[in-house]
Image (tube, rainbow, N blue to C red):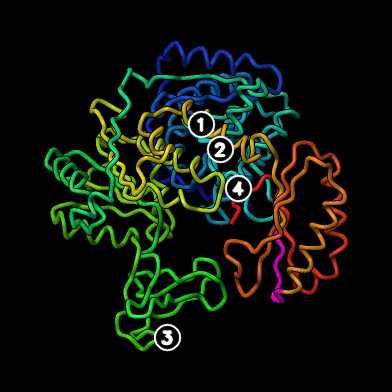
Amino acid sequence: TIQEKIISRDPYENHQFEKSESLQLLPDQALACEKIIAATEQETFLIHGVTGSGKTEIYLQTIEAKLKEGKEAIVLVPEISLTPQMVERFKSRFGSEVAVLHSALSSGEKYDEWRKIERKEARVVVGARSAVFAPFENLGIIIIDEEHEASYKQEDNPRYHARDVAIWRAEKYQCPVVLGSATPSLESFARAKKGVYTLIELPSRVNDRAMPEVRVVDMRVELRKENRTEFSTELLEKIKDRIAKKEQTVLMLNRRGYSSFVMCRDCGYVVECPNCDISLTYHQSSNQMKCHYCGHEERVPKHCPSCEGEHIRYFGTGTQKVEESLTKLIPEARVIRMDVDTTRTKGAHEKLLKSFRNHEADILLGTQMIAKGLDFPDITLVGVLNADTMLHLPDFRASERTFQLLTQVSGRAGRHERTGEVVVQSYNPEHYSIEFAKQHDFIGFYNHEMKLRKMGSYPPFYYLTMINVSDENEMKAIRTIQEMAQFLRGKLGPDAVILGPVPSTITRIKNKYRYQCIIKYKIEPNLKKELKTLITHYQKDQQKGLTITIDVQPYVLM
Protein backbone atom coordinates (compact mmCIF):
# COMPACT_ATOMS: atom_id res chain seq x y z
CA THR A 1 0.00 0.00 0.00
CA ILE A 2 1.08 3.57 -0.67
CA GLN A 3 -0.11 6.04 1.90
CA GLU A 4 0.52 9.69 2.68
CA LYS A 5 1.70 10.51 6.16
CA ILE A 6 2.56 13.88 7.70
CA ILE A 7 5.85 13.91 9.59
CA SER A 8 6.25 17.21 11.38
CA ARG A 9 9.65 18.83 11.87
CA ASP A 10 9.99 19.61 15.54
CA PRO A 11 12.74 22.12 16.40
CA TYR A 12 12.73 20.82 19.99
CA GLU A 13 12.59 17.04 19.41
CA ASN A 14 16.02 16.40 20.98
CA HIS A 15 15.15 18.32 24.14
CA GLN A 16 14.09 16.66 27.33
CA PHE A 17 11.77 19.03 29.20
CA GLU A 18 11.30 18.09 32.86
CA LYS A 19 7.68 18.47 33.92
CA SER A 20 7.25 21.46 36.24
CA GLU A 21 4.44 22.02 38.73
CA SER A 22 2.68 25.28 39.62
CA LEU A 23 4.47 27.13 42.40
CA GLN A 24 2.83 28.53 45.49
CA LEU A 25 1.99 32.16 44.71
CA LEU A 26 2.79 35.08 46.98
CA PRO A 27 -0.16 37.32 47.98
CA ASP A 28 0.73 39.97 45.33
CA GLN A 29 1.03 37.35 42.59
CA ALA A 30 -2.18 35.57 43.63
CA LEU A 31 -4.11 38.86 43.55
CA ALA A 32 -2.74 39.61 40.07
CA CYS A 33 -3.78 36.15 38.81
CA GLU A 34 -7.29 36.51 40.23
CA LYS A 35 -7.80 39.89 38.55
CA ILE A 36 -6.60 38.64 35.16
CA ILE A 37 -8.55 35.36 35.25
CA ALA A 38 -11.72 37.18 36.32
CA ALA A 39 -11.64 39.51 33.28
CA THR A 40 -14.58 38.52 31.10
CA GLU A 41 -14.14 41.18 28.42
CA GLN A 42 -11.27 42.96 26.71
CA GLU A 43 -9.14 44.53 29.43
CA THR A 44 -5.46 45.47 29.25
CA PHE A 45 -3.40 44.80 32.37
CA LEU A 46 0.05 46.29 32.93
CA ILE A 47 2.11 44.27 35.41
CA HIS A 48 4.84 46.55 36.73
CA GLY A 49 7.06 44.21 38.72
CA VAL A 50 10.73 44.62 39.64
CA THR A 51 13.19 42.18 38.01
CA GLY A 52 12.83 38.79 39.68
CA SER A 53 9.33 39.46 41.09
CA GLY A 54 7.88 36.31 39.53
CA LYS A 55 6.04 37.66 36.48
CA THR A 56 6.59 34.43 34.50
CA GLU A 57 4.78 32.34 37.12
CA ILE A 58 1.77 34.68 36.83
CA TYR A 59 1.79 34.15 33.05
CA LEU A 60 1.94 30.36 33.48
CA GLN A 61 -0.87 30.16 35.99
CA THR A 62 -3.24 32.53 34.16
CA ILE A 63 -2.69 30.52 30.96
CA GLU A 64 -3.37 27.29 32.84
CA ALA A 65 -6.70 28.70 34.01
CA LYS A 66 -7.62 29.76 30.46
CA LEU A 67 -6.67 26.34 29.02
CA LYS A 68 -8.98 24.69 31.55
CA GLU A 69 -11.80 26.84 30.14
CA GLY A 70 -10.93 25.36 26.73
CA LYS A 71 -9.32 28.54 25.40
CA GLU A 72 -5.97 29.35 23.78
CA ALA A 73 -3.07 31.65 24.64
CA ILE A 74 -0.37 33.70 22.87
CA VAL A 75 2.87 34.69 24.64
CA LEU A 76 5.16 37.23 22.97
CA VAL A 77 8.82 37.69 23.91
CA PRO A 78 11.01 40.41 22.43
CA GLU A 79 14.10 38.56 21.20
CA ILE A 80 15.05 35.16 19.85
CA SER A 81 17.66 34.95 22.60
CA LEU A 82 14.87 35.00 25.18
CA THR A 83 12.85 32.32 23.46
CA PRO A 84 14.97 29.30 24.58
CA GLN A 85 14.42 30.10 28.28
CA MET A 86 10.75 30.98 27.78
CA VAL A 87 10.16 27.89 25.62
CA GLU A 88 11.73 25.73 28.31
CA ARG A 89 9.45 27.17 31.00
CA PHE A 90 6.30 26.78 28.90
CA LYS A 91 7.13 23.36 27.43
CA SER A 92 7.94 21.97 30.88
CA ARG A 93 4.57 23.23 32.16
CA PHE A 94 2.31 22.55 29.14
CA GLY A 95 4.26 19.88 27.20
CA SER A 96 3.34 19.28 23.56
CA GLU A 97 0.56 21.88 23.63
CA VAL A 98 3.16 24.60 23.01
CA ALA A 99 4.03 25.79 19.50
CA VAL A 100 6.98 28.10 18.89
CA LEU A 101 7.15 30.79 16.21
CA HIS A 102 10.21 32.97 15.66
CA SER A 103 12.63 33.96 12.91
CA ALA A 104 15.42 31.51 13.85
CA LEU A 105 13.31 28.54 12.73
CA SER A 106 13.69 27.22 9.20
CA SER A 107 10.77 27.79 6.81
CA GLY A 108 9.78 24.13 7.12
CA GLU A 109 9.74 24.22 10.91
CA LYS A 110 7.67 27.43 10.87
CA TYR A 111 5.21 25.86 8.45
CA ASP A 112 4.84 22.75 10.64
CA GLU A 113 4.37 24.77 13.83
CA TRP A 114 1.75 26.87 12.02
CA ARG A 115 -0.06 23.70 10.86
CA LYS A 116 0.11 22.34 14.41
CA ILE A 117 -1.79 25.43 15.61
CA GLU A 118 -4.25 25.22 12.74
CA ARG A 119 -4.99 21.53 13.45
CA LYS A 120 -5.75 22.52 17.08
CA GLU A 121 -2.86 20.36 18.39
CA ALA A 122 -1.25 23.36 20.05
CA ARG A 123 -3.11 25.72 22.36
CA VAL A 124 -0.22 27.93 23.50
CA VAL A 125 2.09 29.87 21.18
CA VAL A 126 5.41 31.34 22.33
CA GLY A 127 7.21 33.58 19.88
CA ALA A 128 8.50 36.93 18.71
CA ARG A 129 6.32 39.78 17.44
CA SER A 130 4.77 38.00 14.41
CA ALA A 131 3.36 35.25 16.69
CA VAL A 132 0.58 37.74 17.52
CA PHE A 133 -1.02 36.62 14.22
CA ALA A 134 -1.15 32.91 15.24
CA PRO A 135 -4.32 31.36 13.72
CA PHE A 136 -6.26 30.72 16.93
CA GLU A 137 -10.04 30.81 16.88
CA ASN A 138 -10.80 30.82 20.60
CA LEU A 139 -8.27 33.12 22.24
CA GLY A 140 -8.37 33.37 26.02
CA ILE A 141 -5.37 35.57 26.78
CA ILE A 142 -2.47 37.41 25.08
CA ILE A 143 0.68 38.09 27.10
CA ILE A 144 3.44 40.51 26.04
CA ASP A 145 6.58 40.11 28.14
CA GLU A 146 9.07 43.02 28.39
CA GLU A 147 6.44 45.22 26.73
CA HIS A 148 8.75 48.26 26.55
CA GLU A 149 10.99 46.60 23.96
CA ALA A 150 11.41 48.43 20.65
CA SER A 151 11.55 45.11 18.75
CA TYR A 152 7.75 44.77 19.08
CA LYS A 153 7.51 47.50 16.46
CA GLN A 154 8.23 46.35 12.91
CA GLU A 155 10.64 48.61 11.04
CA ASP A 156 9.46 47.84 7.49
CA ASN A 157 5.99 47.50 5.94
CA PRO A 158 3.55 46.78 7.45
CA ARG A 159 4.82 48.95 10.32
CA TYR A 160 2.67 47.47 13.05
CA HIS A 161 3.24 47.39 16.80
CA ALA A 162 2.52 43.97 18.34
CA ARG A 163 0.88 45.63 21.35
CA ASP A 164 -1.71 47.42 19.20
CA VAL A 165 -2.45 44.25 17.19
CA ALA A 166 -2.83 42.26 20.43
CA ILE A 167 -5.34 44.74 21.89
CA TRP A 168 -7.24 44.80 18.59
CA ARG A 169 -7.40 40.98 18.47
CA ALA A 170 -8.41 40.76 22.14
CA GLU A 171 -11.41 43.00 21.45
CA LYS A 172 -12.73 40.45 18.98
CA TYR A 173 -12.37 37.56 21.45
CA GLN A 174 -13.27 39.66 24.54
CA CYS A 175 -10.15 38.43 26.38
CA PRO A 176 -7.49 40.12 28.54
CA VAL A 177 -4.11 41.38 27.30
CA VAL A 178 -1.30 41.28 29.86
CA LEU A 179 1.70 43.59 29.42
CA GLY A 180 4.59 42.83 31.75
CA SER A 181 7.80 44.77 32.44
CA ALA A 182 10.10 45.98 35.19
CA THR A 183 10.50 49.20 33.21
CA PRO A 184 7.27 49.81 31.25
CA SER A 185 7.39 52.26 28.37
CA LEU A 186 6.30 55.76 29.36
CA GLU A 187 3.30 55.50 27.03
CA SER A 188 2.01 52.32 28.70
CA PHE A 189 2.63 53.54 32.24
CA ALA A 190 0.88 56.85 31.51
CA ARG A 191 -2.12 54.91 30.15
CA ALA A 192 -2.16 52.77 33.29
CA LYS A 193 -2.05 55.91 35.46
CA LYS A 194 -5.02 57.36 33.53
CA GLY A 195 -6.96 54.12 33.96
CA VAL A 196 -6.91 53.10 30.28
CA TYR A 197 -4.94 50.02 31.37
CA THR A 198 -5.34 48.27 34.74
CA LEU A 199 -2.12 48.62 36.75
CA ILE A 200 -0.83 45.69 38.83
CA GLU A 201 2.22 46.41 40.99
CA LEU A 202 4.70 43.75 42.21
CA PRO A 203 7.06 45.85 44.33
CA SER A 204 9.29 43.12 45.79
CA ARG A 205 11.31 40.16 44.54
CA VAL A 206 10.26 36.57 45.22
CA ASN A 207 11.62 35.26 48.62
CA ASP A 208 12.25 38.94 49.47
CA ARG A 209 15.68 38.88 47.79
CA ALA A 210 17.37 42.26 48.01
CA MET A 211 17.79 44.24 44.78
CA PRO A 212 21.47 44.19 43.77
CA GLU A 213 23.63 47.13 44.88
CA VAL A 214 24.58 49.31 41.91
CA ARG A 215 27.91 51.14 41.89
CA VAL A 216 28.60 53.78 39.24
CA VAL A 217 32.26 54.26 38.25
CA ASP A 218 33.31 57.56 36.69
CA MET A 219 35.53 56.59 33.74
CA ARG A 220 36.93 60.14 33.48
CA VAL A 221 38.71 59.55 36.80
CA GLU A 222 40.11 56.26 35.44
CA LEU A 223 41.48 58.11 32.41
CA ARG A 224 43.23 60.60 34.69
CA LYS A 225 44.82 57.63 36.47
CA GLU A 226 46.29 56.61 33.08
CA ASN A 227 43.98 53.57 32.86
CA ARG A 228 43.46 53.12 29.12
CA THR A 229 41.67 49.73 29.21
CA GLU A 230 37.92 49.18 28.90
CA PHE A 231 37.78 48.09 32.56
CA SER A 232 37.92 50.23 35.67
CA THR A 233 40.20 48.99 38.46
CA GLU A 234 37.14 48.28 40.64
CA LEU A 235 35.42 46.12 38.02
CA LEU A 236 38.61 44.12 37.32
CA GLU A 237 39.12 43.40 41.03
CA LYS A 238 35.50 42.26 41.35
CA ILE A 239 35.73 39.96 38.30
CA LYS A 240 38.91 38.32 39.70
CA ASP A 241 37.20 37.91 43.06
CA ARG A 242 34.19 36.18 41.41
CA ILE A 243 36.43 33.80 39.46
CA ALA A 244 38.22 32.88 42.70
CA LYS A 245 34.84 32.19 44.37
CA LYS A 246 33.65 30.15 41.33
CA GLU A 247 30.77 32.56 40.75
CA GLN A 248 29.68 33.96 37.38
CA THR A 249 29.81 37.41 35.81
CA VAL A 250 27.82 39.04 33.03
CA LEU A 251 29.47 41.88 31.10
CA MET A 252 27.41 43.99 28.75
CA LEU A 253 28.65 46.24 25.99
CA ASN A 254 26.42 48.64 24.13
CA ARG A 255 27.39 47.61 20.56
CA ARG A 256 28.81 44.86 18.34
CA GLY A 257 31.80 44.48 16.01
CA TYR A 258 35.47 44.90 16.87
CA SER A 259 35.81 48.64 16.92
CA SER A 260 33.64 51.40 15.67
CA PHE A 261 35.70 52.85 12.87
CA VAL A 262 39.10 52.98 11.17
CA MET A 263 40.90 56.32 11.21
CA CYS A 264 44.23 57.74 10.04
CA ARG A 265 46.15 59.25 12.97
CA ASP A 266 48.08 61.62 10.72
CA CYS A 267 45.29 63.45 8.89
CA GLY A 268 42.08 62.25 10.66
CA TYR A 269 40.65 60.52 7.55
CA VAL A 270 37.86 58.05 8.48
CA VAL A 271 37.08 55.20 6.08
CA GLU A 272 33.46 55.61 4.95
CA CYS A 273 31.03 53.50 2.95
CA PRO A 274 30.87 54.56 -0.73
CA ASN A 275 27.06 54.06 -0.81
CA CYS A 276 26.03 55.44 2.60
CA ASP A 277 27.03 58.42 4.72
CA ILE A 278 28.39 56.33 7.57
CA SER A 279 31.83 55.07 8.62
CA LEU A 280 32.60 51.38 8.05
CA THR A 281 32.76 49.06 11.08
CA TYR A 282 35.84 46.89 11.53
CA HIS A 283 35.31 43.14 12.05
CA GLN A 284 38.44 41.38 13.24
CA SER A 285 37.49 37.76 12.52
CA SER A 286 37.47 38.44 8.76
CA ASN A 287 39.83 41.47 8.90
CA GLN A 288 37.15 43.30 6.91
CA MET A 289 35.38 46.60 7.21
CA LYS A 290 31.61 46.31 6.78
CA CYS A 291 28.75 48.74 6.34
CA HIS A 292 25.89 47.70 8.63
CA TYR A 293 23.37 49.40 6.34
CA CYS A 294 24.01 48.22 2.78
CA GLY A 295 26.39 45.28 3.39
CA HIS A 296 29.37 46.82 1.50
CA GLU A 297 32.68 45.17 2.53
CA GLU A 298 36.32 46.04 1.91
CA ARG A 299 39.73 45.19 3.33
CA VAL A 300 41.51 47.53 5.75
CA PRO A 301 43.93 49.78 3.79
CA LYS A 302 47.65 49.59 4.69
CA HIS A 303 48.13 53.28 3.84
CA CYS A 304 45.75 56.19 4.31
CA PRO A 305 43.91 56.84 1.00
CA SER A 306 44.03 60.58 1.76
CA CYS A 307 47.60 61.37 2.95
CA GLU A 308 49.43 58.07 2.27
CA GLY A 309 50.27 57.89 6.01
CA GLU A 310 50.89 54.51 7.65
CA HIS A 311 49.17 55.22 10.96
CA ILE A 312 45.78 53.65 10.26
CA ARG A 313 44.26 52.69 13.63
CA TYR A 314 41.00 51.30 15.03
CA PHE A 315 38.91 53.43 17.37
CA GLY A 316 36.07 52.55 19.74
CA THR A 317 35.33 49.27 21.46
CA GLY A 318 33.48 46.18 20.34
CA THR A 319 32.79 42.78 21.86
CA GLN A 320 35.75 41.10 20.09
CA LYS A 321 38.16 43.74 21.35
CA VAL A 322 36.85 43.50 24.93
CA GLU A 323 37.21 39.71 24.80
CA GLU A 324 40.84 40.14 23.73
CA SER A 325 41.56 42.62 26.55
CA LEU A 326 39.92 40.27 29.06
CA THR A 327 42.18 37.37 28.10
CA LYS A 328 45.23 39.64 28.42
CA LEU A 329 44.20 41.06 31.81
CA ILE A 330 42.77 37.87 33.34
CA PRO A 331 44.33 34.92 31.46
CA GLU A 332 42.53 32.32 33.61
CA ALA A 333 39.03 33.66 32.77
CA ARG A 334 36.87 31.53 30.47
CA VAL A 335 34.73 33.85 28.34
CA ILE A 336 31.63 33.19 26.25
CA ARG A 337 30.91 35.95 23.75
CA MET A 338 27.34 36.51 22.64
CA ASP A 339 26.66 39.02 19.87
CA VAL A 340 25.23 39.14 16.37
CA ASP A 341 28.36 37.50 14.93
CA THR A 342 28.55 34.50 17.30
CA THR A 343 24.79 33.77 17.21
CA ARG A 344 24.34 33.71 13.42
CA THR A 345 24.05 29.92 13.18
CA LYS A 346 20.93 28.03 14.15
CA GLY A 347 20.59 27.07 17.82
CA ALA A 348 23.72 29.09 18.71
CA HIS A 349 21.87 31.15 21.35
CA GLU A 350 20.82 28.04 23.16
CA LYS A 351 24.22 26.36 22.94
CA LEU A 352 26.02 29.38 24.38
CA LEU A 353 23.52 29.89 27.21
CA LYS A 354 23.55 26.18 28.03
CA SER A 355 27.33 26.02 28.32
CA PHE A 356 27.22 29.12 30.54
CA ARG A 357 24.59 27.50 32.75
CA ASN A 358 26.79 24.36 32.98
CA HIS A 359 29.68 26.49 34.28
CA GLU A 360 31.83 26.01 31.19
CA ALA A 361 32.66 29.72 31.45
CA ASP A 362 33.08 32.35 34.16
CA ILE A 363 32.11 35.38 32.11
CA LEU A 364 29.26 35.95 29.66
CA LEU A 365 30.17 38.93 27.51
CA GLY A 366 27.60 40.28 25.12
CA THR A 367 25.58 43.05 23.55
CA GLN A 368 22.04 44.01 24.61
CA MET A 369 20.72 40.53 23.88
CA ILE A 370 22.02 39.35 27.28
CA ALA A 371 20.35 42.15 29.24
CA LYS A 372 16.88 40.67 29.52
CA GLY A 373 15.14 37.61 30.87
CA LEU A 374 18.19 35.48 31.74
CA ASP A 375 17.88 33.68 35.05
CA PHE A 376 21.00 31.87 36.26
CA PRO A 377 21.56 31.13 39.96
CA ASP A 378 25.30 31.83 40.07
CA ILE A 379 25.46 35.28 38.48
CA THR A 380 26.53 37.57 41.30
CA LEU A 381 28.22 40.33 39.32
CA VAL A 382 26.98 42.36 36.36
CA GLY A 383 29.23 44.90 34.65
CA VAL A 384 28.07 47.50 32.14
CA LEU A 385 31.15 48.64 30.26
CA ASN A 386 29.79 51.77 28.60
CA ALA A 387 26.46 52.92 29.94
CA ASP A 388 26.25 56.13 27.95
CA THR A 389 26.74 55.20 24.28
CA MET A 390 22.99 55.52 23.76
CA LEU A 391 22.55 58.76 25.68
CA HIS A 392 23.93 60.94 22.90
CA LEU A 393 21.79 59.69 20.05
CA PRO A 394 19.44 62.27 18.47
CA ASP A 395 16.35 60.54 19.82
CA PHE A 396 13.95 61.71 22.52
CA ARG A 397 13.76 58.14 23.87
CA ALA A 398 17.54 57.91 24.44
CA SER A 399 17.44 58.38 28.22
CA GLU A 400 14.40 56.10 28.58
CA ARG A 401 16.23 53.32 26.69
CA THR A 402 19.37 53.79 28.79
CA PHE A 403 17.38 53.60 32.02
CA GLN A 404 15.52 50.48 30.85
CA LEU A 405 18.67 48.73 29.71
CA LEU A 406 20.56 49.43 32.94
CA THR A 407 17.62 48.32 35.09
CA GLN A 408 17.13 45.15 33.04
CA VAL A 409 20.77 44.15 33.01
CA SER A 410 21.25 44.83 36.72
CA GLY A 411 18.23 42.61 37.34
CA ARG A 412 20.29 39.60 36.16
CA ALA A 413 22.37 39.66 39.36
CA GLY A 414 21.61 37.92 42.65
CA ARG A 415 18.28 36.38 41.66
CA HIS A 416 18.74 33.34 43.93
CA GLU A 417 20.54 32.62 47.23
CA ARG A 418 23.62 34.74 46.59
CA THR A 419 23.46 38.52 46.70
CA GLY A 420 24.30 40.43 43.54
CA GLU A 421 26.39 43.45 42.68
CA VAL A 422 26.33 45.71 39.63
CA VAL A 423 29.12 47.95 38.36
CA VAL A 424 28.15 50.58 35.78
CA GLN A 425 30.95 52.42 33.96
CA SER A 426 30.04 55.80 32.55
CA TYR A 427 31.58 59.02 31.27
CA ASN A 428 28.70 61.12 32.60
CA PRO A 429 27.60 59.38 35.80
CA GLU A 430 25.56 62.42 36.92
CA HIS A 431 22.98 61.88 34.12
CA TYR A 432 19.53 61.38 35.66
CA SER A 433 18.78 58.11 33.84
CA ILE A 434 21.92 56.53 35.36
CA GLU A 435 21.16 58.04 38.79
CA PHE A 436 17.60 56.64 38.85
CA ALA A 437 18.73 53.23 37.53
CA LYS A 438 21.26 53.11 40.36
CA GLN A 439 18.42 53.55 42.88
CA HIS A 440 16.14 51.07 41.00
CA ASP A 441 13.67 53.98 41.06
CA PHE A 442 11.25 53.65 38.13
CA ILE A 443 8.65 56.06 39.55
CA GLY A 444 11.28 58.78 40.11
CA PHE A 445 12.54 58.34 36.55
CA TYR A 446 8.99 58.32 35.17
CA ASN A 447 8.07 61.60 36.89
CA HIS A 448 11.29 63.35 35.81
CA GLU A 449 11.09 62.14 32.21
CA MET A 450 7.38 63.00 31.90
CA LYS A 451 8.13 66.65 32.75
CA LEU A 452 10.74 66.76 29.96
CA ARG A 453 8.38 65.06 27.50
CA LYS A 454 5.66 67.57 28.32
CA MET A 455 8.01 70.49 27.76
CA GLY A 456 9.12 69.08 24.40
CA SER A 457 5.61 68.00 23.30
CA TYR A 458 6.60 64.36 22.83
CA PRO A 459 4.72 61.09 23.49
CA PRO A 460 2.85 60.23 25.64
CA PHE A 461 1.51 63.84 25.48
CA TYR A 462 1.52 63.99 21.68
CA TYR A 463 1.33 61.42 18.90
CA LEU A 464 4.07 61.33 16.28
CA THR A 465 4.05 60.45 12.59
CA MET A 466 7.26 60.44 10.59
CA ILE A 467 7.45 60.87 6.83
CA ASN A 468 10.65 59.77 5.12
CA VAL A 469 11.41 60.42 1.44
CA SER A 470 14.44 58.97 -0.35
CA ASP A 471 15.67 59.13 -3.93
CA GLU A 472 18.96 58.82 -5.83
CA ASN A 473 18.41 62.40 -7.04
CA GLU A 474 18.88 64.60 -3.97
CA MET A 475 16.99 67.61 -5.37
CA LYS A 476 13.98 65.43 -6.18
CA ALA A 477 13.86 64.09 -2.61
CA ILE A 478 14.07 67.63 -1.16
CA ARG A 479 11.42 68.99 -3.52
CA THR A 480 9.00 66.12 -2.81
CA ILE A 481 9.21 66.35 0.98
CA GLN A 482 8.87 70.16 0.89
CA GLU A 483 5.71 69.86 -1.20
CA MET A 484 4.33 67.26 1.21
CA ALA A 485 5.04 69.36 4.30
CA GLN A 486 3.50 72.41 2.63
CA PHE A 487 0.36 70.44 1.71
CA LEU A 488 -0.05 69.08 5.26
CA ARG A 489 0.45 72.50 6.87
CA GLY A 490 -2.63 73.71 4.99
CA LYS A 491 -4.73 70.66 5.93
CA LEU A 492 -3.95 70.01 9.61
CA GLY A 493 -5.36 71.77 12.68
CA PRO A 494 -3.65 74.74 14.37
CA ASP A 495 -2.25 72.58 17.22
CA ALA A 496 -0.36 70.19 14.95
CA VAL A 497 3.38 70.87 14.71
CA ILE A 498 5.37 69.92 11.62
CA LEU A 499 9.12 69.67 12.23
CA GLY A 500 11.35 69.82 9.18
CA PRO A 501 11.83 68.80 6.48
CA VAL A 502 15.49 68.07 7.35
CA PRO A 503 18.10 65.55 6.15
CA SER A 504 17.89 62.26 8.11
CA THR A 505 20.65 61.53 10.66
CA ILE A 506 22.24 59.17 8.12
CA THR A 507 21.67 61.23 5.00
CA ARG A 508 22.49 58.59 2.41
CA ILE A 509 21.89 54.83 2.49
CA LYS A 510 22.42 52.58 -0.55
CA ASN A 511 23.08 55.66 -2.69
CA LYS A 512 19.67 57.15 -1.89
CA TYR A 513 19.40 60.57 -0.23
CA ARG A 514 17.01 60.60 2.75
CA TYR A 515 14.95 63.51 4.05
CA GLN A 516 12.32 63.44 6.77
CA CYS A 517 9.73 65.47 8.62
CA ILE A 518 7.88 64.71 11.84
CA ILE A 519 4.28 65.64 12.63
CA LYS A 520 3.30 66.07 16.30
CA TYR A 521 -0.41 66.13 17.06
CA LYS A 522 -2.99 65.35 19.73
CA ILE A 523 -6.16 64.73 17.74
CA GLU A 524 -6.08 64.82 13.92
CA PRO A 525 -9.03 62.83 12.57
CA ASN A 526 -8.18 63.79 8.95
CA LEU A 527 -4.47 62.93 9.06
CA LYS A 528 -4.79 59.37 7.70
CA LYS A 529 -6.97 60.53 4.82
CA GLU A 530 -4.54 63.33 3.86
CA LEU A 531 -1.53 60.98 4.01
CA LYS A 532 -3.33 58.53 1.72
CA THR A 533 -3.99 61.41 -0.72
CA LEU A 534 -0.26 62.19 -0.75
CA ILE A 535 0.80 58.59 -1.39
CA THR A 536 -1.69 58.30 -4.28
CA HIS A 537 -0.48 61.63 -5.70
CA TYR A 538 3.16 60.46 -5.84
CA GLN A 539 2.41 56.98 -7.19
CA LYS A 540 4.02 57.60 -10.61
CA ASP A 541 7.22 58.92 -8.97
CA GLN A 542 7.33 55.88 -6.71
CA GLN A 543 7.45 53.64 -9.77
CA LYS A 544 10.53 55.57 -10.90
CA GLY A 545 12.48 54.90 -7.71
CA LEU A 546 11.22 57.53 -5.26
CA THR A 547 10.51 55.93 -1.88
CA ILE A 548 7.98 57.39 0.55
CA THR A 549 7.64 55.75 3.96
CA ILE A 550 5.15 56.87 6.55
CA ASP A 551 5.63 55.61 10.09
CA VAL A 552 2.89 56.24 12.65
CA GLN A 553 4.34 56.30 16.20
CA PRO A 554 7.91 55.64 15.04
CA TYR A 555 10.44 54.00 17.36
CA VAL A 556 13.53 54.80 15.31
CA LEU A 557 13.97 58.42 14.32
CA MET A 558 17.41 58.12 12.67
State yes or no: residue 75 in magenta.
no
- The residues tagged by marks 1 and 4 sit, at their Cα atoms, a distance apart of 21 Å
Q: Amino acid at mark 2?
A: Leu
SS type, badge 1: helix
Q: Are marks 1 and 3 in contact (CB under 8 Å)?
A: no
Question: Which residue is under mark 3?
Answer: 306
Residue at left offset 53%, top offset 16% = 32
**Please, is residue 97 above or below residue 263 in the view?**
above
Q: Amino acid at mark 4?
A: Tyr
Magenta range:
468-474
SS type, badge 3: loop
Q: Earlier in the sequence, mark 2 or mark 3?
A: 2
Question: Which residue is under mark 1?
Answer: 448
For the C terminus, the quadrant is bottom right
SS type, badge 2: strand
- Residue 426 x/y as whole percent: 33, 47
In the rendered structure, the answer to whether residue 317 lies left or right of residue 450 reads: left
Q: Residues within 10 Å of mark 3 (few under 14, many from 20)?
A: few
- The residues tagged by marks 2 and 3 sit, at their Cα atoms, a distance apart of 50 Å
Residue 245, quarter of the rendered image:
top left
Q: Which mark is residue 76?
A: 2
Question: Which residue is under mark 4?
Answer: 555
Mark 2 or 3: the one toward you: 3
Q: Amino acid at mark 1?
A: His
Mark 4 or 3: the one toward you: 3
Residue 271, quarter of the rendered image:
bottom left
Mark yes or no: residue 397 visible: yes
Q: Earlier in the sequence, mark 1 or mark 3?
A: 3
Q: Amino acid at mark 3?
A: Ser
Mark 2 or 1: the one toward you: 1
- The residues tagged by marks 4 and 2 sit, at their Cα atoms, a distance apart of 18 Å
Q: Earlier in the sequence, mark 4 or mark 3?
A: 3
